[in-house]
Amino acid sequence: MQLFFLPDLTLNNKTADFNKDESKHIFKVLRKEIGDDINITNGKNIFFKGTISSISKNNCQVSIKEIIKKNPLPYSLHIGISLLKSSERFEWFLEKASEIGISEITPLICDRTEKKYINENRFKKILVSSMKQSLKTHLPKLNSVTSLKDFIKTKTNEDLFIAHCNDSAKSLLIKSIKPKSSYLILIGPEGDFTDKEVELCSSKKFKNVSLGDTRLRAETAGIVACHTFSIANL
């Protein structure tokens, strides 16, 4: 099954119109014809089933036949993760986190972060592609890059965690999770958080957690954290 993405589609829509680029892909590459079925999501946990009513290389219109509201994640997960030296590794994290299930992602600049910017449009396209590939109907929210110090000042109702390898008392993440709750976990850069950053986050009520005995790359730590929350909520 193929899944298409139209973010502006609502429950009130009777038809769906694809832009020129997407229409050309549907018409020229996929070779869809009038009468063929099309599956669409708006990224907000809604699944639309439709049938192509008209198609050309410039326009594809779909008549909506059925609308299905999908259940959201049984929990909310926000990961604040440092930007990485390699954009490819950060993109890998975005792709896999979206496949596993995540609500929100904030790229962070920490003391040891070397990269200070992102290609936000590219990152959003990766999240959309991953959502479609895994046939999900929820598009994770990607926030703008912010410093760790500014980020932790934000008020939140989430359970707060910071995962690190520093020599301080930590609990295993899997044993710290309450199912069906809202979580925010911080993942540091290559070289990990500094002791000062850990102390600062602890002063803001972040709980120190461990992802296990193995020392992980930053992007792997993000995926392990994401998967741990998913498993804990089965």
Image (cartoon, helix red, strand yellow):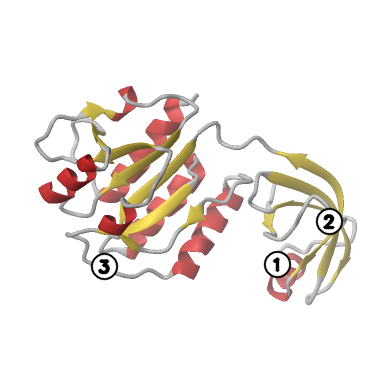
Point 42% across, 45% down: residue: 78
Q: Residue 123's spot in the image, x, y percent?
A: 46, 63
**Frontmost residue, 196 versus 137:** 196
Near mark 2 (Cα within 10 A), the count class, few <14, some 14-19 or many ≥20, is few
Picture quarter containing residue 221? top left
Q: Residue 101's spot in the image, x, y percent?
A: 50, 41
- Which amino acid, mark 1? Val
Q: Which residue is mark 1?
A: 29
Q: Secondary structure at mark 3?
A: loop
- The answer to whether 159 is drawn above or below residue 19 in the figure is above
Give the Cα separation between the discs numbered 1 and 3: 37 Å
Q: Secondary structure at mark 1?
A: helix
| Marks 1 and 3 close (CB-CB < 8 Å) | no
Q: Which residue is mark 2?
A: 13
Point 34% across, 45% down: residue: 222
Decide which of tag 2 and tag 3 comes sooner along the chain: 2
Q: Nearer the viewer, mark 1 or mark 3?
A: 3
- Which amino acid, mark 3? Lys
- The answer to whether 21 is drawn above or below residue 37 in the figure is below
Point 83% across, 51% down: residue: 50
Q: Which residue is mark 3?
A: 115
Near mark 3 (Cα within 10 A), the count class, few <14, some 14-19 or many ≥20, is some
- Which amino acid, mark 2? Asn
